[in-house]
């Protein structure tokens, strides 16, 4: 073995996925070992939330993962609803499903930037961003905000839906579906892309489970596990859909799983619009003081399992609490960038040129490691 | 949800009756209270019973009772995502517990978090260090309840006074009230 070379990748690097750095140990071109250096976006959310009221905490939630903010809100909301011991109204459950699926679509479309960018397929990136822009405009129309929506709220959803909700939503789907089909034909079946991505970063199903992978990265290895199906939270129990999964577990399979998930999301939104009750309440009002209790909200976010673990205990024995005692968020990115990346690099010949494709195919969102 | 017979058979006899089902909605779970000295043997048994997906460790600090509570969240992919919470309590002034990083690889990084945010020493862990907080934080473990991070931030960045910024001398083009120092003088 020739002399090993240590270099740093990121955080100021076009190939690095957001605010995170890597320490690479190189033997010639091959990456022998990779270490994650997180913390560039650490804002101490868990501690800050202990100082603020529970409804103010909800506004901080989406800041944890910029690309897929609504699933963080959803996990927080599920945990809070367990503490308050309430069920949201039927209408709110369907609205939540639609919001969450649009968030998943927007996140997968933004992921094209991390994935197609390093392969220099800029056309795919701009096409995807054009489709995402339509979704952001839709979010602006429904919730009043483009990026962070604060729309899913413990007890239901924050506002009622507008009068022309159904036709506007169908119109957005009509615009973005052909754009995704273009991406399907023009990028995912392009011979150069297939040549670059196939066989890179193979992850066996048993290893994926052992190392803690969730979401599309786990399903890309052939494991059909989806919390939407297994927990049937909100209105997912009444909606009929299939879980897309890969077979071989390489970067190409993981990419195809995400592409098929975009079609699945559109299918789910269409179904939810049909089955949704348009009459009825959209939110139960909750008291300002928190009951004592514990809640664990688990949702299937665009990247995998997102868990909010909230404990409500009186910090002062004389007064009832307005703030949660402890909040812990577990994002899906930590296993993907630590254990899985280390495992793949140790067992397969990954060169520096393949590394952006491998990291991109894992779809990381580093802020949910730092929090 | 029902009790997993395989799990019950693999548990040591003194814990057989301690399993309970709690929670609702997505947080419905099996719960088990254990003694901190048994954490390795229990988690090994749980792994063999099919709970192979490690979610995380939640550390909760109770300074009044001199206790750190550790909640190990695990789930089983074969058993349709069933959630299992293993809880244990250690003394706050002697924060030592055995590491489980060799059973669950992801626990390695979750234990580093427990070390840097709460100062818990995981025995047998070979890489306890500042990881997320590296170059971000000087001082005691910040997520402990008796550490007032707001006070520390005020002292470092605001000179100990409440949100009073230092007087700004640079001109902002004549449009801003900050030009006069930001305060009424």
Image: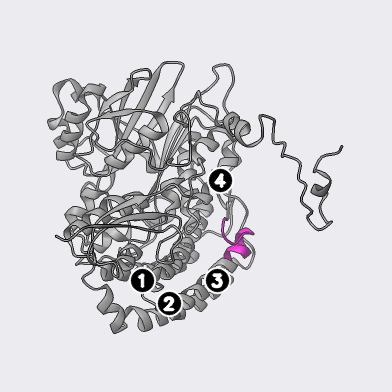
How far apart in space, not on screen, are marks 3 and 1 (Cα)?
Answer: 18 Å
Q: Image check: B2 left or right of A239? A: left
The residue segment tinted magenta is A138-148
Q: Image check: A69 left or right of A285? A: left
Q: Which quadrant would residue B44 be assigned to in this image? A: top left
Q: Choose the circle earlier in sequence order: 4 or 1.
A: 4
Q: Choose the circle earlier in sequence order: 3 or 4.
A: 4
Residue A172, percent from left and from top? 54, 73
> What mark, if any, has residue A305 been given in the picture?
none
Tell which subunit mark 4 falls on.
A
Q: Choose the circle earlier in sequence order: 3 or 2.
A: 3
At 62% across and 63% down in the image, what residue appears?
A140
Magenta-drawn stretch contains A363: no
Q: Choose the circle earlier in sequence order: 3 or 1.
A: 3
Q: Choose the circle earlier in sequence order: 2 or 4.
A: 4
Pointers 2 and 1 in contact (C-beta within 8 Å): yes
How far apart in space, not on screen, are marks 4 and 1 (Cα)?
Answer: 30 Å
- Badge 1 density bin: few <14, some 14–19, many ≥20, Cα 10 Å: many
Q: Which quadrant would residue A223 be assigned to in this image? A: bottom left
Which residue position holds label 1? A259
At 51% across and 41% down in the image, what residue appears?
A45
- Badge 3 density bin: few <14, some 14–19, many ≥20, Cα 10 Å: some
How far apart in space, not on screen, are marks 3 and 4 (Cα)?
Answer: 23 Å
Residue A67, percent from left and from top? 48, 59
Q: Which quadrant would residue A161 be assigned to in this image? A: bottom right
Which residue position holds label 3? A133
How far apart in space, not on screen, are marks 3 and 2 (Cα)?
Answer: 13 Å
Q: Image check: A113 left or right of A169? A: left
Which residue position holds label 2? A180
User: Relative to the observer, which residue lies in front, A245 or A277?
Assistant: A245
Which residue position holds label 4? A60
Residue B46 visible within the image:
yes
């Amino acid at each position: 073995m020739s002399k090993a070379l240590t270099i740093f990748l990121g955080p100021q690097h076009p190939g690095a996925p957001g605010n995170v750095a890597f320490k690479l140990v190189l033997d010639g071109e091959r990456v022998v070992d990779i270490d994650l250096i997180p913390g560039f976006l650490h804002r101490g959310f868990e501690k800050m939330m202990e100082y603020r009221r529970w409804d103010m905490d909800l506004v901080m939630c989406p800041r944890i993962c910029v690309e897929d903010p609504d699933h963080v809100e959803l996990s927080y909301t599920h945990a809070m609803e367990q503490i308050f011991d309430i069920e949201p109204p039927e209408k709110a459950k369907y609205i939540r499903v639609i919001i969450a699926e649009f968030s998943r679509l927007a996140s997968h479309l933004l992921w094209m930037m991390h994935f197609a960018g390093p392969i220099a397929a800029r056309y795919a990136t701009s096409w995807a961003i054009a489709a995402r822009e339509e979704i952001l405009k839709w979010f602006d129309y429904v919730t009043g905000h483009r990026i962070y929506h604060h729309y899913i709220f413990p007890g239901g959803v924050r506002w009622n839906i507008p009068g022309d909700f159904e036709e506007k939503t169908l119109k957005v789907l009509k615009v973005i579906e052909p754009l995704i089909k273009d991406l399907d034909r023009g990028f995912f079946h392009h011979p150069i892309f297939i040549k670059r991505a196939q066989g890179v970063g193979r992850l066996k199903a048993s290893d994926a489970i052992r190392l803690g992978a969730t979401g599309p990265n786990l399903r890309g290895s052939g494991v059909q596990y989806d919390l939407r199906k297994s927990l049937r939270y909100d209105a997912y129990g009444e909606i009929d859909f299939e879980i897309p999964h890969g077979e071989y577990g390489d970067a190409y399979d993981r990419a195809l799983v995400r592409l098929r998930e975009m079609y699945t999301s559109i299918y789910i939104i269409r179904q939810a619009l049909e089955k949704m009750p348009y009459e009825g309440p959209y939110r139960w009002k909750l008291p300002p003081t928190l009951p004592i209790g514990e809640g664990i909200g688990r949702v299937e976010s665009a990247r995998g399992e997102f868990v909010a673990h909230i404990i409500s205990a009186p910090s002062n024995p004389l007064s009832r609490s307005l703030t949660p005692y402890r909040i812990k968020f577990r994002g899906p990115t930590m296993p993907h960038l630590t254990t899985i990346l280390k495992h793949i690099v140790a067992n397969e010949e990954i060169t520096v040129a393949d590394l952006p494709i491998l990291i991109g195919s894992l779809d990381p969102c580093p802020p949910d490691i730092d929090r | 949800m029902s009790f997993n017979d395989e799990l019950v058979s693999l548990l040591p006899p003194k814990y057989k009756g301690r399993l309970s089902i709690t929670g609702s909605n997505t947080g419905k779970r099996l719960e088990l209270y254990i003694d901190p000295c048994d954490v390795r043997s229990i988690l090994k048994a749980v792994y063999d019973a099919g709970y192979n997906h490690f979610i995380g460790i939640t550390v909760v600090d109770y300074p009044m009772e001199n206790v750190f509570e550790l909640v190990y969240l695990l789930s089983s992919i074969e058993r349709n995502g069933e959630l299992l919470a293993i809880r244990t309590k250690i003394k706050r002034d002697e924060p030592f517990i055995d590491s489980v990083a060799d059973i669950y690889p992801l626990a390695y990084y979750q234990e580093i978090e427990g070390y840097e945010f709460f100062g818990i020493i995981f025995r047998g862990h070979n890489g306890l260090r500042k990881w997320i907080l590296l170059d971000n934080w000087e001082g005691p473990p910040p997520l402990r309840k008796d550490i007032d991070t707001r006070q520390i931030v005020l002292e470092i960045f605001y000179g100990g006074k409440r949100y009073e910024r230092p007087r700004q001398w640079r001109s902002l083009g004549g449009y801003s009230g900050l030009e006069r120092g930001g305060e009424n003088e």
